Image (cartoon, helix red, strand yellow):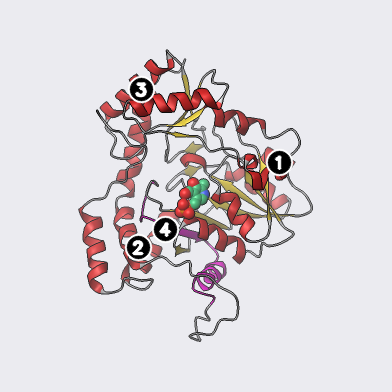
Amino acid sequence: MKKISVAEPSIGKKEIEYVTRAVKSGWVSSRGEFIEEFETAFAAFCGVKRAVSTSNGTCALHLVLLALGIGPGDEVIVPTLSFVATANAVTYTGAKPAFADVDAACWCITAEEIEKRITPRTKAIMVVHLYGHPADMAAIGKVARKHKLLLIEDAAEAHGAVCRGKVVGGLSDAAVFSFYGNKILTTGEGGMVTTNSRKLADKIHFLKNHGMDPRRRYWHPEVGYNYRMTNLHAALGVAQLERVDEFLAQKRKIIGWYRNALDEKLVQLQVEMPWAVSAWWMVSVLVKGCAGEERRNAIIAALAKRGIETRPLFYPMHFFPMYSRSAPKGGLPVSEKLYKMGINLPSGVKLRKNDVAYVAECLHSILAYH
Ligand SMILES: Cc1ncc(COP(=O)(O)O)c(C=O)c1O
């Protein structure tokens, strides 16, 4: 039986060559030629002054929040529909995530929903460019300026996404990317902070390196962390970044194939807004008329029987025990509806047109029964 995975990475000759070079150089930890090369190239890709590599996207979020001075007593507004790391990073600092709802079409947090959640304790807004689709940074930026709030992009899933003509990563005080194995670019595990503030980048670099004074070895004026990326991971990252245009072009081909193959009477794709260019990390659909998680799960299981790996949409984070008291009265209805109906379809760059046709055909025939 054909096996189609949800997001298989593409590791080519270049990746193997660069990682081999890094291993052979002896620089296998967090120093070596590839670290700086990756950071410089990634900053250029996002059009920002600085990029700081980290061990993963979650610790990159943690570092950004710490470096911006967020801590106990503060609230950070986040969309409830995201991967749990978005809220957990806020919690690590002692601050509280305040959950906001998302837009029903593009599934990202909106300026209107953010305004509803602002309190005297609000210190920052952390948007998420969900499944590769950018949040509307122009509208959200206005809210941040009006209320004097810090603005952070969780761009873990959105390398190369474009909002109103500007690539994500430089549209806020600082942005964070993930290079986990299923992401648009991978280093195995890895993360990056991008920012136009040299001061903030220096602070993040200091914190990720055990809080060591850069001019005085083994002098640690603050509690820091070991959140560094290794040269081996950076070598993989440099090779992947050299192929980013190829990956993003392939992603656009894949969404085009799905648009042609899927029956809109049965499923609704995540909507790409007129002002946005999604990076299409995950091609995701809502199953029309799907009122419960059980039916969605049955569809996922039926696809798995046909060799097709999929994922459910994220649970709204205010459903989790540790965050259930942070939900506003009346809940967050859009996110609560979306997660029950949503499925991430196979989206990896190695997909071919006939794979997409097979997924669509199986999905349609399963929906005729479920
Ligand atoms: C929206 C979002 N934020 C943060 C993360 C955390 O990144 P990492 O897995 O690299 O720690 C992920 C995914 O993995 C994510 O999807």
223 above or below 364?
below
- Residue at image position (51%, 74%) is 210
Question: Which residue was labeled with disc 4?
Answer: 190
Q: Amino acid at mark 1?
A: Ala
Q: Mark 4: which secondary structure?
A: loop
Of callouts 1 and 3, the N-terminal one: 1
Q: Mark 3: which secondary structure?
A: helix
Q: Check if mark 4's residue and mark 1's residue have beta carbons within 8 Å.
A: no
Q: Check if mark 4's residue and mark 2's residue have beta carbons within 8 Å.
A: yes
**Image-based side of 121 in relation to 107, left or right:** right
Callout 3: few (<14), some (14-19), or many (20+) C-alpha neighbours within 10 Å? many
Q: Amino acid at mark 4?
A: Gly
**Image-based side of 52 in relation to 109, left or right:** left
246 above or below 91?
above
Callout 4: few (<14), some (14-19), or many (20+) C-alpha neighbours within 10 Å? many
Callout 1: few (<14), some (14-19), or many (20+) C-alpha neighbours within 10 Å? some
Of callouts 2 and 1, the N-terminal one: 2
Where residue 148 sits in the image (x, y, percent)? 72, 55
Magenta stretch bounds: 184-211
Give the label, 1 or 3, closer to the camera.
Answer: 1
Question: Which residue was labeled with disc 3?
Answer: 360
Q: Mark 2: which secondary structure?
A: helix
Q: Check if mark 4's residue and mark 3's residue have beta carbons within 8 Å.
A: no
- Residue at image position (34%, 39%) is 348
Q: Amino acid at mark 2?
A: Ala
Q: Which mark is residue 234?
A: 2
